[in-house]
Amino acid sequence: MTTSSITELRAKRSRRRNTNMLIGSVLVSLVVLAAVLSFIWTPYNPYEQFFAEKHQGSSLSHLMGTDRLGRDVFSNILYGARITLLVGLVAVGIALLVGTPLGILAGMKRGATEEVTMRFADILLAFPALLMAIMFAAVYGPGTVSAMVAIGIGSIPGFARIARSGTLQVMSTEYVQAARASSQPALRVAWRHVMPNIVGMVVVQSSVTFALAVLAEAALSFLGLGTQPPTASWGRMLQESQQYISINPMLVVWPGLAIAVAVMGFNLLGDGLRDRFDPKLNGERS
Amino acid sequence: MKNENTLLSVEGLSVSTGRFPLVHDVNFAMARGERIGLIGESGSGKSVTSTALMSLLPDGLQATGTVKLAGHEANFVDASDAVMRKIRGRDMAMVFQEPLTALNPLMRAGAQVAEIMLQHQMVPSRRAAKAKAIEMLASVKLPDPAEAAMAYPHQLSGGQRQRVMLAMALANDPSLLLCDEPTTALDVTVQRQVLDLVLESVVQRGTGLLFITHDLAVVANMCTRVLVMNNGKVVEQGATEEIFTRPQHPYTRGLLAASDLEATDHDGRLFTVASAAAYVPWTVAETEAHAAAAEETPVEPAAPQQDAEIQPVIKITDLSRTYKRGRTSLFGKPTEVHALQKANFTVLPGERLGVVGESGSGKSTLLRILAGLDQPTSGSAVVAGNEVAGAPESQLVQLRQELQIVFQDPMGSLNPRMKVLDIVTEPLLVPGRTENAAKRRKMAEEMLEAVGLGAETLERYPHQFSGGQRQRISIARALICRPRVLVADEPVSALDVSVRAQVLNLLADLVDAYQLTLVFVSHDLAVVRYLCDKVVVMQSGIIVEAGDTESVYTNPQHPYTAKLVASSMNLHAEVLAKAGTA
Amino acid sequence: MVMRILTNIARFVASIIAASILVFVVLRLVPGDPAQIALGVDASPALLEAKRAEFGTDRPVLVQYFDWASGLPFGDFGTSYLSRQDISPMVLDKVQVSLILVLLAMILALVIAIPFGTFAAVRHNKVSGAVVSAVSQLGIAIPGFLAGLLLVIFFALKLGWFPSNGWTAPGVDFGEFLSRVALPVVALASVQAAILTRYVRSAVLEVMSEDYLRTARAKGLSPMKALFKHGLRNAAIPVITVTSVQLAALIIGAVVIERVFVIPGLGSMLLDAVGNRDMLTVQSVVMVLVGITLAINLIVDLLYTVVDPRIRKSA
């Protein structure tokens, strides 16, 4: 096809990607805002119990009502955003810092290094983040820290694979051949050629992994193996509400909604970023 | 324009994306059995035109105008898909450029041929379709049609796949065959065979042919009439011989001038679109005279320059490279591929050596070994006094100051995320070089100047340049550390004809100016003939012939070389042949 | 082809061994001593010693590993430190429950995802296609256990159509089994269906832009016929890959779902063991979960051979 029609198609796609990006950014900002707000102000102390006011519905004084102990649900949701973001950040941080260099190494060194790294990643793939976290909870006892670390470790293979396939692509290009044909040291090739060209993929992977980490933390806390009481966590709120599901179903809905907002936000953000960084759209290979 | 004999009539055909016109007001009529060539460079709108004729435009493109095929009332531009479905594959069929992707990878070749007949109920039963498919595969001269019918596309070679495509297109005996660059993805010798087959088939069946290509020689060979497209418009049309000997439009003249590798200006350089005004195409008589002269002039063997004093820049001795193809299973034996076998040759300083071969001939392996990107399995390669075989990475630094590469793909050879300044100065950032940033910048400016780009390009990114400009940047990068040897890997095969001439001229200028020794790898004999004074011909990892370019070209010794020469299309020869038959 | 199958099986065995090492290393790095946990903090050294000998934890780590691992191929997982019962019969009992859940959910997810994903791809420029995409985006954001809770609120508590929890084996009372298995399977399948819909959509979109689909149209096939006859089988290849990758997520999802619906499967067994710090049981159940994942991956790998002639011939 000709250049001008491609330009036009690209413009069309960029409009769509902007909606993904836009909604994603708004939802993620909501979660961040909730977490920030919780440090400055919450309507009530989230841990303060008012037995007289238990299981209230939504009202002006309690936006999302109260739970079985009369605690304000809205305040707890705001506090819960902290844990959600903390777990996501730490888990993504671990997976990114370990997985990406491993993947680049495997893609550049090839041979035995690649074989060993990727086999290891393959085996880790059979241990999803949540299973890893359950194992860690068994060993070190349940808690936010072991959850974060385990989810991070469980997410390493994703980054390693993405980074490796991106590196392989870059290494096969003629510009890397040209760099090698002028004796550029491997580290400079990694820094100047590989990294800038795979950073997009890694950013997308980070966003998607963040969503998965939020899900894993929620599930773990729901099982009682994640964040421990009284610290507010959306997953734990779900766990506590399960017994009262017939009395007060809204106790499931609010934290559920919060989880959905966070997960959808990071997923959409990832989609939007993927469209932006898509190599098929970037490199002018018409 | 309308008469009994008209097969296809196209009136006022325009295609646009809504805002941008891609094809503007195309008019032509094709008689039954006529063969028309549609010539254009990339972006000229020739492929869009062909898809519009099939009414298979991608979403978002709209066509206006009239397209009618004899025997059908419908105007293809606004006919419903239900109507078009009965015509496509039945009365008009198409052969696409890339046969590997155009065939369904999960379906046997025979079934894909049978499908088109079943779709239009041209055969009474599945079994009959199967039998007829094998017949069709035989008619396109596949050696074992029954076996080919059972094969999946990946089990066939490129040429065989294109034969399957042709068998499919001709299965229902359509009155019109559209071919969109059907041989561009094929090797030279295979290209010739497929073209001959297409020509033979359409002549035999009286099929109308619309042949879309960028290659003037191919059109001269295949077609009786030519349409020249530029920027979405047909700038000139007429009989092949007429257009190729007396072009009226400046664009056509430019295209002809740039394609003619035998004509040079007073500086001994190729004509470009810019200098085409001075270009006078040979008349048929002149062409005949040249051909006769070439036959009479015995090629004097190049005077052996027995100058023992001159040390060769490159000396290749018994060079071999064997790959172990990755094992597909733990228990399978790795297969060995002999990419290069016992190659020997020397290149003297200032010589221009062409390395010619088709895909899989080992020419790229040879080049990679010369550049120290790959290690030979055995033998020796000495480049500018450095032994490549067995040299550790640290020793190759010196070699690479003396030898640099220009690659084929102008898109892929520049890092999209680096500025031109950083790209061009990269070879200076190696141990042993001491230039500081300011000095490097100055050198980059000089080099860009030398390749015909201004200093203002330093701060730009690759995507802001055209293919030809990017290739100039690649050349600047290769020459910045002033190597003695320049190795070019198909540097012009991804470029349009008009740009090709410019880049070839630039290479010739720079080789002179910097007194470079040139190793030029190409599949295109004509390009090598223009640029190089010596040539080695490779086939399946073996050098089958080596010598002086002119003598190898005019008097090939090895049968493969002869086949290669015979297969490569020469514009003059094709025009001559056309004039002879007309 | 036989070579390919053998290679796959060899790789499977190697992965199982590597996974067993990983499980053993992670879970045996336990700071706690199983004997101490069993006896309490104020047990006498002599008693502890005896207990360790009984558990076999006084032996070198390597011996312990081989002792445990050598039993694995025969389904012998050893004796629980806590209940002093054989772990194997319990595992075998519960693995059936979990497998039923996982397989039903996977089938349901595919049954939903394939038509909807194809639809969303074919209609990608239309509103209806965008709606399917948006719904699948929402589906991904609602984790299985949350979907389970919501289903319970609506279908069990509000409408009373299904029991809110519990389990009946299919052999005991099939009707009862169906009514009890419905909600958990739907909850488990919903996320997977949403994820797979997106993958099916992009696989079909990819195929729709392939040259061979244009060839099919040039032969005179209608857009739909071209897609169904030439596109879907090609689109199946990446979808099979994703399905096998998603399987691990589905199995671990079942663990959580079992908690929501109080189903006595491997998940409940695992979580109880974690709660009791019954390490050998944890170790065994994790191994079984991973083993199932790897085994199904093996089957999927072999499936490729059937679908893709390019792989079939290469070996």
Image: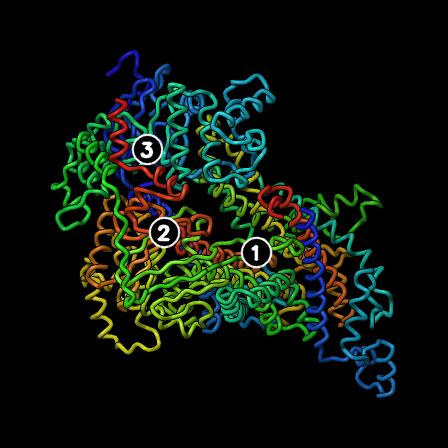
In this rendered view, identify the residue nearer to me: A125 or B272. Answer: B272
Q: Which residue is mark 2?
A: B546
Q: Which residue is at 25% across, 47% downward?
A: B300
**Coordinates of residue B520 in the picture (x, y in percent):** 32, 54
Numbered disc 3: secondary structure = strand
For discs 1 and 2, the disc positioned in front in the rendered view: 2
**Coordinates of residue C49 in the picture (x, y in percent):** 85, 84
In this rendered view, identify the residue nearer to me: A109 or B368. Answer: B368
Co-location on one chain, circles 1 and 2? yes
**Which comes before the other along the chain, label 3 or label 2?**
3
**Which comes before the other along the chain, label 3 or label 1?**
3
Q: Pointer 3: residues within 10 angstroms few (<14), some, or many (20+)?
A: many
Q: Which residue is mark 3?
A: B212
**Residue at the bottom extreme of this rendering:** C45
Co-location on one chain, circles 3 and 1? yes
Q: Quadrant of residue B3?
A: top left
**Which comes before the other along the chain, label 1 or label 2?**
1
The chain ID associated with circle 2 is B
Q: Which residue is at 32% across, 46% downward?
A: B552
